[in-house]
Amino acid sequence: MSKIVYIPELEKGRYLHLSYSGESCAIRDFIARGNKPCRDYQTSQIANMITDCFPADRVPVSNTNFWIERLKEVSKNKLGDRAVVDVALPIYKNNNNSVLKLSSEKLEQNDFLHKKPRVLFYGERGIVNTLFIELSNNKQAFCDFINSTITCQGNKVYDKEIDKYMIVIEPNFGMQGFGTPDAVITINDELLIMFEAKRRTFMEEINELTYQTDLNYSIGKHFTEIDFIPSVINLEPIYSSEANKQRGYRGGAFRKLYTNDEHKYFFADFIKCNKFSCLSLTTDRSEKQIADYYRNTNDIELKNLSWIGYDSIRKIVDKYNLEWIGAHLEMNKRHLGAY
């Protein structure tokens, strides 16, 4: 069996070719690697990573030229401006296997190359790191960030003066627990924010983002309801869909987090808060996509869900001349588009 698939976790700029039989599969990025397959995954692993797919043309994988053009066509039609098909050329040009150089024309046109900072954090994780490193050192910029964040009911997530805040980047709540949020923020020992950042729209990241949000919602709510640090958090999460529930139940209905000294270092600050919000950073124009998805979900309230867009981040960058964040927005242009 073979399919044309979009697996943003592996390649966010183009569609790939997938062939499989049972748990054995081969992924071919013809545009970048010709007919050289990747066999590092089982079929069931890849199935959970695919966000779009359809049957492949009945053309042998040995016909590399056909597949290069076919995947270019699909990528452009499906991804539009986010498609990356001209800067990643096939590895081999002719029969003597001479290696081609990657095209740098588009990169040379990017002003970012002439003003990049000395330190760069790569990709989605890089955006999170640089965002909070710079915001943590600029209180007014951080306040603007919070003021630009709105709940899925259309209100500001926090409308008081901010005197105190703390940011924990990627706390590990356990593989059988509640995963690893991109960041957890406390404001005035009152509001707890569970933060997730994506470089695409909510609907494009719906499978992964809603699953992360569901886990964040459950443990965030729990933190605001307890007044001590337990040795074990044993909690059945609130899931927004049957698919998320089935995924979460693979290790049993209850998720367990065994607290250690690292957790205790900042959990004391988390449980002081009496309100929480699950915040998503996406390329959408508003919170509508998230609100529409969760509107009729039992036990998950829109007042506890919030959103901020990259256009708001850009305004803060320009206002305070935040060099690192600005550089990373430039570096991620092909993912973020025009926000």
Image (tube, rainbow, N blue to C red):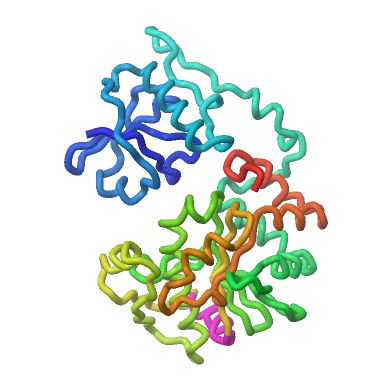
Report the residue that reaches farthest toward the bottom.
Answer: 227
Where residue 204 sits in the image (x, y, percent)? 48, 50
- Depicted 90 relative to depicted 324: above or below: above
Most foreground residue, 159 or 128: 159
Left or right of 84? Residue 38 is left
Q: Position of residue 231 (x, y in %)?
A: 39, 84
Foreground pick, 29 / 289? 289
Q: Residue at x 25, y 37 (%)?
A: 25
Residue 92, image x, y percentages: 42, 16
Q: In this view of the protein, which residue sits in the foreground, 268 or 249?
A: 249
Q: Position of residue 245 (x, y in %)?
A: 32, 68
Is residue 272 highlighted in magenta? yes
Question: Horizontally, is 291 left or right of 187 in the view?
Answer: left
Report how many numbered discs are placed on residues in the image. Answer: 0
Q: Is residue 55 above or below residue 320?
A: above
At horizontal 56% and vertical 50% (from top left) the residue drawn is 199
Most extreme residue toward the left, as rendered?
22
Query: Which quarter shows the N terminus?
Result: top left
The reply, left or right, for residue 122 in relation to residue 176 is: right
Magenta span includes 77: no
* Magenta part of the chain: 263-274
What residue sits 48% from the left and 54% below the top? 203
Residue 97 vertical position relative to residue 33 in the rendered view, above or below: above
Examine the rendering and report whether any part of residue 149 can be seen.
yes
Tell me which residue sits at (48%, 41%) in the image: 12
In this orientation, does residue 183 appear?
Answer: no
Specify the principal SS of the magenta part: helix
